[in-house]
Image (cartoon, grey):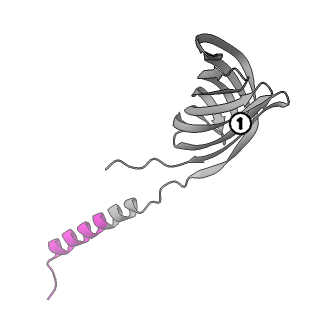
Protein backbone atom coordinates (compact mmCIF):
# COMPACT_ATOMS: atom_id res chain seq x y z
CA UNK A 1 0.00 0.00 0.00
CA UNK A 2 1.63 3.31 -1.10
CA UNK A 3 1.25 6.92 -0.12
CA UNK A 4 -1.28 9.05 -1.95
CA UNK A 5 0.39 11.21 -4.65
CA UNK A 6 -0.14 14.53 -2.77
CA UNK A 7 1.41 13.14 0.44
CA UNK A 8 4.39 11.81 -1.53
CA UNK A 9 4.92 15.24 -3.17
CA UNK A 10 4.74 17.01 0.20
CA UNK A 11 7.26 14.57 1.67
CA UNK A 12 9.55 15.07 -1.33
CA UNK A 13 9.27 18.88 -1.07
CA UNK A 14 10.00 18.80 2.67
CA UNK A 15 13.02 16.58 2.08
CA UNK A 16 14.36 18.92 -0.64
CA UNK A 17 13.99 21.94 1.67
CA UNK A 18 15.83 20.18 4.51
CA UNK A 19 18.64 19.08 2.15
CA UNK A 20 19.01 22.60 0.71
CA UNK A 21 19.15 24.15 4.20
CA UNK A 22 21.71 21.56 5.34
CA UNK A 23 23.90 22.28 2.31
CA UNK A 24 23.80 26.02 2.97
CA UNK A 25 24.82 25.55 6.60
CA UNK A 26 27.65 23.20 5.63
CA UNK A 27 29.52 25.88 3.63
CA UNK A 28 32.89 26.21 5.38
CA UNK A 29 33.85 29.53 6.93
CA UNK A 30 36.57 31.49 5.18
CA UNK A 31 40.00 30.36 6.32
CA UNK A 32 42.14 32.79 8.21
CA UNK A 33 45.40 34.01 6.70
CA UNK A 34 48.56 34.92 8.56
CA UNK A 35 52.13 36.01 8.11
CA UNK A 36 54.83 38.41 9.25
CA UNK A 37 55.03 41.97 7.98
CA UNK A 38 58.58 43.35 8.13
CA UNK A 39 60.03 46.61 6.92
CA UNK A 40 61.03 50.12 7.89
CA UNK A 41 59.34 53.24 9.19
CA UNK A 42 60.20 56.92 9.10
CA UNK A 43 58.94 59.85 11.14
CA UNK A 44 57.34 62.42 8.83
CA UNK A 45 56.62 64.77 11.75
CA UNK A 46 57.05 64.62 15.51
CA UNK A 47 55.76 67.23 17.95
CA UNK A 48 56.45 67.06 21.70
CA UNK A 49 54.49 69.21 24.12
CA UNK A 50 55.80 69.37 27.73
CA UNK A 51 53.11 68.46 30.27
CA UNK A 52 54.98 68.02 33.57
CA UNK A 53 58.34 67.77 35.30
CA UNK A 54 59.32 66.18 38.61
CA UNK A 55 62.73 65.39 40.12
CA UNK A 56 64.50 65.75 36.77
CA UNK A 57 62.00 63.56 34.93
CA UNK A 58 60.13 65.27 32.10
CA UNK A 59 56.75 64.21 30.68
CA UNK A 60 55.65 65.01 27.12
CA UNK A 61 52.55 64.55 25.00
CA UNK A 62 53.91 63.44 21.63
CA UNK A 63 52.09 63.41 18.29
CA UNK A 64 53.81 61.89 15.26
CA UNK A 65 53.05 61.05 11.67
CA UNK A 66 54.89 57.86 10.65
CA UNK A 67 55.31 56.28 7.21
CA UNK A 68 55.56 52.48 7.05
CA UNK A 69 57.11 50.65 4.08
CA UNK A 70 57.42 46.92 3.48
CA UNK A 71 54.88 44.34 4.61
CA UNK A 72 52.88 47.10 6.29
CA UNK A 73 52.48 50.14 4.04
CA UNK A 74 50.83 53.44 4.83
CA UNK A 75 50.95 56.52 7.01
CA UNK A 76 49.85 56.32 10.66
CA UNK A 77 49.19 58.93 13.31
CA UNK A 78 50.68 58.12 16.71
CA UNK A 79 49.87 59.79 20.02
CA UNK A 80 51.83 58.87 23.11
CA UNK A 81 53.05 59.83 26.55
CA UNK A 82 56.85 60.14 26.46
CA UNK A 83 58.81 60.10 29.72
CA UNK A 84 62.45 61.27 29.68
CA UNK A 85 64.20 60.38 32.93
CA UNK A 86 67.06 62.36 34.47
CA UNK A 87 69.55 59.59 33.52
CA UNK A 88 68.59 59.98 29.82
CA UNK A 89 66.52 56.81 29.61
CA UNK A 90 63.07 57.03 28.02
CA UNK A 91 59.85 55.08 28.10
CA UNK A 92 56.28 55.58 27.04
CA UNK A 93 53.07 54.20 25.62
CA UNK A 94 50.49 55.27 23.09
CA UNK A 95 47.99 54.60 20.32
CA UNK A 96 48.65 54.36 16.61
CA UNK A 97 45.84 54.89 14.06
CA UNK A 98 45.92 54.22 10.33
CA UNK A 99 43.03 55.21 8.08
CA UNK A 100 44.40 53.55 4.93
CA UNK A 101 47.15 50.97 5.38
CA UNK A 102 47.91 47.77 3.52
CA UNK A 103 48.94 44.42 5.01
CA UNK A 104 49.00 41.17 3.02
CA UNK A 105 47.43 42.89 0.00
CA UNK A 106 44.44 44.09 2.05
CA UNK A 107 43.75 47.77 2.60
CA UNK A 108 41.77 49.22 5.48
CA UNK A 109 42.11 50.94 8.82
CA UNK A 110 43.46 49.80 12.18
CA UNK A 111 44.24 50.94 15.71
CA UNK A 112 47.18 49.60 17.67
CA UNK A 113 48.62 50.18 21.12
CA UNK A 114 52.36 50.33 21.74
CA UNK A 115 54.93 50.64 24.52
CA UNK A 116 58.60 51.54 24.24
CA UNK A 117 61.77 52.11 26.25
CA UNK A 118 65.39 52.99 25.59
CA UNK A 119 67.84 55.89 25.57
CA UNK A 120 69.35 58.47 23.23
CA UNK A 121 71.04 55.63 21.35
CA UNK A 122 67.71 54.08 20.39
CA UNK A 123 64.44 52.64 21.55
CA UNK A 124 62.75 49.27 21.32
CA UNK A 125 59.11 48.53 21.74
CA UNK A 126 56.12 46.35 21.03
CA UNK A 127 52.89 47.00 19.17
CA UNK A 128 49.57 45.15 19.29
CA UNK A 129 46.68 45.55 16.83
CA UNK A 130 43.48 46.14 18.81
CA UNK A 131 40.86 46.86 16.13
CA UNK A 132 40.55 46.99 12.36
CA UNK A 133 37.98 47.67 9.66
CA UNK A 134 37.50 47.56 5.90
CA UNK A 135 39.89 45.20 4.16
CA UNK A 136 41.81 44.78 7.43
CA UNK A 137 38.77 43.55 9.36
CA UNK A 138 39.71 40.60 11.56
CA UNK A 139 43.34 41.77 11.95
CA UNK A 140 45.03 40.47 15.11
CA UNK A 141 48.66 40.28 16.21
CA UNK A 142 51.61 42.56 16.66
CA UNK A 143 55.31 42.45 17.32
CA UNK A 144 58.48 44.42 17.91
CA UNK A 145 60.00 47.61 16.57
CA UNK A 146 63.37 49.33 16.99
CA UNK A 147 64.35 52.93 16.26
CA UNK A 148 67.81 54.42 16.37
CA UNK A 149 70.75 55.88 14.47
CA UNK A 150 71.07 52.74 12.32
CA UNK A 151 67.45 53.04 11.15
CA UNK A 152 63.92 52.13 12.15
CA UNK A 153 62.59 48.60 11.64
CA UNK A 154 59.55 46.54 12.59
CA UNK A 155 58.43 42.92 12.50
CA UNK A 156 54.71 42.32 13.15
CA UNK A 157 53.09 38.90 13.11
CA UNK A 158 49.51 39.15 11.91
CA UNK A 159 46.46 36.98 11.43
CA UNK A 160 43.17 37.78 9.73
CA UNK A 161 40.48 35.88 11.54
CA UNK A 162 37.00 35.56 10.04
CA UNK A 163 34.19 37.27 11.92
CA UNK A 164 32.22 34.99 14.18
CA UNK A 165 28.46 35.07 13.73
CA UNK A 166 26.47 36.65 16.57
CA UNK A 167 24.19 34.27 18.42
16 inside magenta stretch: yes
Q: Secondary structure at mark 1?
A: strand
Left or right of 72? Residue 120 is right
Q: Which residues are magenta?
A: 1-18
Closer to the camera, 167 or 25? 167
**What residue sits right under mark 1 in the picture?**
145
22 inside magenta stretch: no
**Residue 150 visible in the shown view:** yes
Does residue 156 sit above or below 87 in this rendering? below
- Residue 16 is situated, as x and y percent measured from the top left of the image, at 30, 67
Quadrant containing the N terminus is bottom left
- Residue extending farthest bottom: 1
Residue at image position (25%, 67%) is 13
Q: Quadrant of residue 70?
A: top right
- Residue 42 is situated, as x and y percent measured from the top left of the image, at 76, 25
Q: Quadrant of residue 93?
A: top right
Left or right of 66? Residue 14 is left
Amino acid sequence: MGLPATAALRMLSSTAIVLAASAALAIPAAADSHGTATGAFAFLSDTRTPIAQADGTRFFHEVASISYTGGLAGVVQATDLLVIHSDGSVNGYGIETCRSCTIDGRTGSFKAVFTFHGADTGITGTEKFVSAAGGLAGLHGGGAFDAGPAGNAYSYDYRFMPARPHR
